Image (spheres, coloured by chain):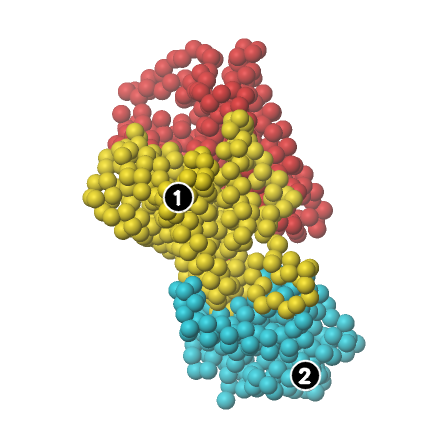
Chain colours: A cyan, B yellow, C red
Amino acid sequence: MSVLTLECISQEFGGLRALDSVYLSIEEKEIFGIIGPNGAGKTTLFNIITGIYVPTEGSLIFNGQRLNNVPAYEIAQMGIARTFQNIRLFNKLSVLDNVRTGSYGVSHSGFMAGMLGLPSSRREEKKILSNALQLLELVDLADKRYEYADNLSYGEQRRLEIARALALEPKLLLLDEPAAGMNSTEKEELMRLIRIIREQRQLSIILVEHDMNVVMNICERIAVLDYGRKIAQGTPEEIKNDDAVIQSYLGAGA
Amino acid sequence: MDAIISQYIDAYYFRILILIGINIILALGLNLTTGVTGQLSMGHAGFMSLGAYTSAILTVHFAVPFFAALLAGALVAALFGFLLGLPTLRLEGDYLAMVTIGFAEIVRVFFLNFEPGGKAVGFSGIPQVTTFTLVWILVIIVIYLNYKLLNSRTGRAMYAIRENEIAAEASGVNTTQLKVLAFTLGAFLGGLGGGLFAHYMFFIEPGNFGFMKSIELLNMVVLGGMGSIPGTILGSIILTIAPEMLRIVQDYRLLFYGALLVILMIFRPNGLLGDVRFYDIKKRFSRKEVKSCQS
Amino acid sequence: MFFEQLINGLTLGSTYALIALGYTMVYGIVQLINFAHGEIYMFGAFAGLFLVAAFGVNIFWALLGAMAFCMLLGVVVERIAYRPLRGKSSRLSALISAIGVSIFLSTLMALLRGTNTTRYPQVMSDKTFHLGSVEVSSMQVIILLVSALLMVGLQLMIQKTRIGKAMRACSQDIDASALMGINVNRVISFTFAIGSALAAAGGVMVGIYYNAVWPYMGTMAGLKAFSAAVLGGIGSVPGAMVGGLTLGVMEIMGVAYLSSSYKDAIAFAILILVLIVRPQGLMGQKISKKV
């Protein structure tokens, strides 16, 4: 059963074709990698899936529902969470509040209930808090929960973004270059974390990443984008031995 | 109640205390829009004037009870806030600033030509029924509700919009809806403050609610710390007292306001208390766990 | 009657256009509503007045002198109040700083000269030309001619010169421009200088035309000119010209055929309507948000 299906997605900016007839199908509980050189259209693809761009052509189907023209916040509420390549945290909020805000799309108390402190809102707040604390435990930031987000180190900020995304209780998690700027120990930790998340939360993950080691290690399937077109798809083994991929991307060194 | 208090306080300070209270209510309204949600509103005086004129016309011309008139004034202001915010809050922040200035100007010109409001001459004979007790009871209620709101899911999402709109959307926040909500609530408090002001001053004119009044209110939010309730209260207190204390240099007041804004933005863009959190203070004094972390 | 009002509208509109150009150029490059721009215009008007009153110069020297003075003032304002904030503060902070400068400058002038209106001395003999049944005053001719000249000059400078090319590059992408070796700070200073000079020209001519200058003249004119810039499409130089002329004509027509008591509300009603219906303005391009 596929969670997300992209059918013939194309995206044009002015005359530039950033994505050209891309088909993708993400299965339940799989870790799916997307690789490709800079400007291949990887982040554009994420922006289309999360509703920031409306694709010029093609359709997106998530759990049987069409995502075209659905606003970004509704897509988030439907269960697609993401992190950003250039980290986008709520800098002047505490680490804890970043994660608590992440659960906005799956909580429901209105502003009146919150303002008047009605029991329904208090109960929900309690749940939000305990979920957030659990997630901070998971990404190992629990003892920094009262720090401002922008006081964290780079690697910590990347982990916080993951925790915030998980607060949305997503069925599909999009990670945009989560290993960027991490050293090799941090990368090991990250891979372990991604596997734990998938097991614990039973969700599908799409991973855009430049680090071949990370991608090859944790992804079950990989798609390769080049100039907006998908040039290959398969298991890590298949991708490593694909001629087109080697030529256009992996190069001689790989 | 007022009679008892005024026995102990000099009439002059009594007046300042009432004005401080009214300004706190006004500034907390603006703080929701600009400080918390990050949408620059420079026409808060327009909402104040809607509240002031609506409530005054109701009490003077229609003999409506004061409380009902006060509420009606706040609701009219909120309605205009909603109607103005709905189409414009989709726009980028800077445009909103201009729209709010334009809106406040239109309101001012409207009341300059509005017969029941006394036109340019001003509106006199408003019953002076705003009391010290009433103002400060309302101040406490408004502070409490503000505090509860900002520590709720809705409040956090409002801060999130200020911090990073795209990330807020990705967390499921309908940013337009919450911006309109913040703007409407801000307008409501603007109208409430306006009603209190009218029934304390017993004479109002469109000039009371000009661009400079909007700037003065904005200054209170910016000086104290954008998004911070204690900061906004502090800003309101300082900027209500300062011109009174500095009567001698009244002429230079605006010069000071202008310079203050520039200097604050360069050296302390978050205001006096904007990035001081009670958590940090508590941490400094004790090693115990603290629960809340909202600034 | 209609054509006379049209000339009046175009005269007023071309002064709006001169001010609007400064807003739009600065916004195009640093995405800042330079709130103090209206005050620069006001200082221009006073500088011209000073030159005429103190040295008895003719209108053209007054114009040039005021433009030179405001160039300097614009650059100084940018240097003190905006540059320290650039890059490290939010746009909200920069905008608030600009509001601060605006208040500071208008109050400063009020303290120096008092809040009353000062009349301009007689600068030139007032002739009236007849074009068929339409009457046009010599000052109107001068305003229209000088504005047209300045706007054509600006267009040439932006399109043909090296610094113009740098300005266009910066308005496309300021970071990339810096990487390409453009001295971004210099381009920004230059933009402020040019915008301020145009505003000063507007100030002097409006001062002579209406025979009045006062310290708060910049606030309303600035707000209206900004409305004109938005109407035309902020960031677009031709847009500011078209927006200014359109707004001037609409305002004069509104006063002539509707009511004069709502004169100041017309510009703002237009601003709000434009932003609701067509936020990119008449000639602006729709920009999608960057992620």
Q: Quadrant of residue C193?
A: top right
Whether residue C27 is visible to the viewer of this picture, yes or no, is: no
How far apart are the alpha carbons under marks 2 and 1?
Answer: 75 Å
Q: Residue at x 72, y 78 (%)?
A: A189
Nearest the viewer among B133 and B142 is B133
| Residue B143, position as x, y percentages in the image | 46, 55
> Residue B78 location, x and y as percent?
35, 52
Q: Position of residue B163 (x, y in %)?
A: 56, 58
Q: Residue at x 46, y 64 (%)?
A: B154
Q: Secondary structure at mark 1?
A: helix
Q: Which residue is mark 1?
A: B4
- The vertical placement of C209 against B211, above or below, is above
Question: Dot 2 lies on which element?
Answer: helix
Q: Residues within 10 Å of mark 1 (few under 14, many from 20)?
A: few
Q: Quadrant of residue A155?
A: bottom right
Residue C100 shows up from this direction: yes
Kindly indicate the quadrant of the structure image that contains residue B294: bottom right
Q: Are marks 2 and 1 on the same chain?
A: no
> Which residue shows up at 52% across the image and 81% down it?
A171
The residue carrying mark 2 is A218
Amino acid, disc 2: Ile
Chain on which label 1 sits: B
Q: Observer-nearest residue: A23 or C56?
A: C56
Q: Amino acid at mark 1?
A: Ile
Which of the two residues, A202 or B206, is positioned nearer the viewer here? B206
